[in-house]
Amino acid sequence: MKAKNSTIYIILIIIFAVSVAQAENNIISDILISGNTKTRDSVILRIIDVKAGDVYTEGLERNVERLLLNSRMFYTVKVEAERAGEGVRLKISLKDKWSVIPFPFASFRENESRYGISLTESNLLGYHKRISATIFREKNKFSEMLFYHDKNVLDSKFRLFVSLKNIKTLVDEWDKKQEINNYYEAVRGIDTGFGYNFYRNMTLSIIHKYNKLAYSDSDDTVRRPENGKEGMLGLSLDVDEADYKEDFVKGFTGRMLYEKDFESLGSDFNRKIFSWRFSYYLNPALRHNLVFMNSGMFGDNLTYGHRFRIEQLRGYERGRFQADRAVVSAIEYIVPVYSFKEARLSFVTFADNAILRNEYQKFSVSDSKSDVGVSVRIYVRRVLIPVFQVYLAYGFSNQKVMPGVSVGMAF
């Protein structure tokens, strides 16, 4: 009996020793990074969340490639694992993406035009920080914006963004007789956000907005009111579960935002707004994208000039593009036609629908606005928005066919 027990103990010891030896053979002994001329090694290691001494598991290479491509900082990524003595060496070879982008933009449709230029650095000093400056002209007024975004403050999971703005917008205001009065809204202020990436690609942020407001007629002679102010606190949840491949996207992205006034104009004090936007990308065929989009806003009465911009609707004149409250849905099917070295040409069909709040402050299906159309677009590699677009849209409610052209980020 004792001999049998001794044999069992010896077998268990042997199994344990073999397991330990196998585990030691699967330890990552070294990580070699090559090809990055700008992005720092520390940033790459932070993105992949792998270090020497970790255990190598099957499929680790593909996961590392996915994480690096999703950062949208590299044109190409190749990851290999090889035996190195008693451990595993991870070899990462990649090519940095050109990160300084001068981005001229313009859009034209009917009597509306907008044009300007944006200069963006998406990998500041190789630390994966983004800074951009934009100036544009619309309705004979210049506007300026400066934006900074840090996804990993001091190599942590905290995120920070700061936006300075000086924006002038022509607003269509409906009076009691349903006649449109135009006036200019000038907004000068700062938006800040501080968030924490608490789970995978989910970030919870506290948002602060503070603006000085001024309103004037088209000749800038009448101001109403002077020295107006607006301050808001908000809470946002951002989710980015999409995989960003070379020429297409797959997965879910979205944002929910709740805002509340702490300082506002007149009776709009304590105004509350809940807004959202979601996109889901499918790949029904090779490099094709089927995109479902939804956005909307519910809230109390808005301050003068504050509107929810409806980006999806393409077949409508200027006054239909902004609303106090709205629910908007869109479907796009994107088919690649030709690929260049750094871009691709695509043919896109789309259908859009928006339900707006009517003059009785009610939502009604009968008030919905819909359009369908086709467009030809050019996308830069791993950039979601089209940098050039020519489209033709038909609006069902106004029964018009409307062409449009946009260059850059303007839509």
Image (cartoon, rainbow, N blue to C red):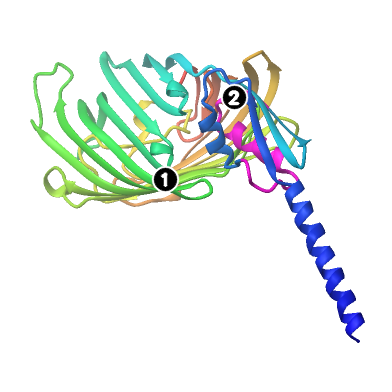
Residue 144 in which image quadrant: top left
Residue drawn at x 73%, y 50% is 24
Residue under label 2, please give it.
Answer: 74
Q: Earlier in the sequence, mark 1 or mark 2?
A: 2
CA–CA distance in space, label 1 to label 2: 33 Å
- Where residue 90 sits in the image (x, y, percent)? 69, 35
Tell me if 333 is positioned left or right of 209 in this view: right
Identity, as a three-letter code, of the amino acid under mark 2: Phe
Residue that label 1 marks: 296
Give the SS element for disc 1. Answer: strand
- Dividing the picture into quadrants, the one containing residue 332 is top right
Range of residues picked out in magenta: 52-77
Identified at 38% across, 32% down, the residue is 149
| Of the pair 56 and 148, the residue shown nearer to us | 56
Q: Position of residue 256 (x, y in %)?
A: 42, 48
Task: Find residue 167 and name its label.
Answer: none
**Residue placed at 76% from the left, 47% from the top?**
25
Q: Position of residue 383 (x, y in %)?
A: 55, 25
Can residue 372 be seen at all in this image of the molecule? yes
Depth order, front residue of 65/168: 65
If the image is split into quadrants, where does the C terminus sit? top left
Q: Is residue 316 visible?
A: no
Residue 99 in the figure: left or right of residue 280: left
